[in-house]
Every structure is written in C-alpha cells, then in structure tokens.
Amino acid sequence: MPRSGGPTGGTQADVGSGGVDHPALLPDARTSLEAARTVAAGCTACDLFARATQTVFGEGPGHAPLFLLGEQPGDREDVEGHPFVGPAGELLGRALDDAGVRREEAFVSNVVKHFKWKPQGKRRLHERPNAAEIRACRPWLDLELDLVRPEVLVLLGATASAAVLGPAFRLTSGRGSVIEPDGVGPARVATFHPSAVLRARDAEARSTMYASLVADLVTAAARAAPGLPGPGPSAVARRSGSAR
Ligand code: URA
C-alpha cells in the first residue's frame, strides 16, 4: 500500500486508493522499474486501457534526482509508447536544455498512463482524465516514486499539481516555489505544463510562460542537485528570447 502521507510527501489529498487488488500492489510488480513496467503493460484498473494503444510508463534513470510529472500521454506518446515525445515533449526538452538539465538525467512520467481521447473526424482529441481515472492510476505513480526516490517532483500543469497537492492548489499563485515534504517523499515544485505554453494566447504570453517554466526547472534542479552547473550563458540568453 502507499505509505501514510504517500511518497509524494503530501497529505490526505494525494494518498492514492487504487484498491488492494491493484496490479501495482502485486509483489512481482514492486521489485524494479522494469518489473513494474511489465505488469503495468497489462493494467485494466480503469477503462482507459480499452481505447489506448498501450500503457505509457515512466522513463529515466532508476535513481534520478528530478522526477517530471505530466498529465497523461498524448497522441504521439500513445503510439510510440514513451512519455513526452510529441510537441509538448519537444518544448519540455528545450526548456530543460535552457535550464541546464539533461533530459536523460530526469525521470519523466504522467499521472495517468493511458491516453484518454475522443474522436474528432480523423483526429483523436485529448480529454482530461477524471478523478476516478486519476485515482485508479495512482498506485503506479506511488510505485514509481517509491522505486526512483527523487529529490524533487516537478508537477507539470494543473492536473499533476492537483493530483499531488490537492484540488485547492492554484498554479497561478503557487508555481515556482519549493514545497518541502512534511515527512517522507520528495520536495515538490509546480510549474506550467508545456502544452499550456504551446497554447498560450499570443507570442508574448508564450514567451513569458516559457521563461517561467525554465526558471521553475532551474529552481527544481538547484534543489535536487545543488552542485550542478545550472543554465549556461547561452541558455540564459535564449531564455530571455522567445519560446520558439
Ligand atoms: N502531455 C503530458 O502530460 N504527458 C505526455 O507524456 C505528453 C503530453
């Protein structure tokens, strides 16, 4: 079972409740990330598996100090089976680069591990996961966090922030500061979701949001591994430019 207080280091709001028969609680799933990934591939804890191509489990080094958490895989991620490989992932990669963080050194995952979508013509339109779907997937996130044991959990966007910090958390006022754990678990830093940056109403808003995302990643990285070099001069110069 998730520990009391949860590996996210929070309170009741973020304690998962996938039920005792959840596949993430099977001893076989709990020995390593690879074992967890294998069991998660067959997860049917909510209905989303039925319309998704595959489970998109978290990826990255086994003991990454930085854990980046998005909402759910998108269309590309669903097809390719890896988190953040579509347009949002491309922007996230640039932001990490500008923050002086190598993406390969971070663990990247999502609150929900199946793509939720509705058809629109030939396209598959992203749909927000609901509370039951988030709850059903929670034991996988708790297991990832138990196995990786990151220093900092970066919450990308409102869904990840609400799932971990509770529904009262507001990204607009709460983003960018380090929320230290009350007990076990990583520190947390909430920031904009890369998709929200891409959807910003105009170039100026996009540039401002992008700079905030990069600054928040710098904050998270400094807390995760204080000795690391951080953004170089070219990255800082790029950061004050546009989101491209
Ligand atoms: N958006 C997310 O939240 N996660 C992904 O993996 C891709 C897009």
Image: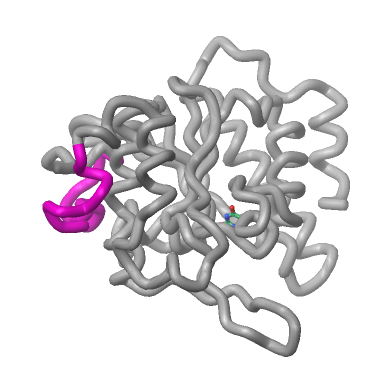
Q: Is residue 13 magenta?
A: yes
Is 237 above or below relative to 241? above
Front residue of 52/206: it is 52
155 to the left or right of 104:
left
Q: Quarter of the image for the N terminus: give it.
A: top left
Q: Which residue appears at 62% of the width and 62% of the height?
A: 74
Residue 205: quarter of image: bottom right
Residue 224 % position (x, y)? 47, 23
Q: Which residue appears at 82% of the width and 51% of the height?
A: 243
- Can residue 196 be seen? no
Is 132 above or below relative to 5? below
Q: Is residue 80 magenta?
A: no
Front residue of 193/114: it is 114
Residue range of the region highlighted in magenta in the rendering: 8-26
Quadrant of the rendered image holding ligand 1: bottom right
Residue 77 % position (x, y)? 64, 54
Residue 195 % position (x, y)? 66, 61
Residue 234: quarter of image: top right
Q: Main secondary structure of the magenta part?
A: loop
Residue 227 % position (x, y)? 56, 10
Is 145 above or below relative to 159? above
171 to the left or right of 99:
left
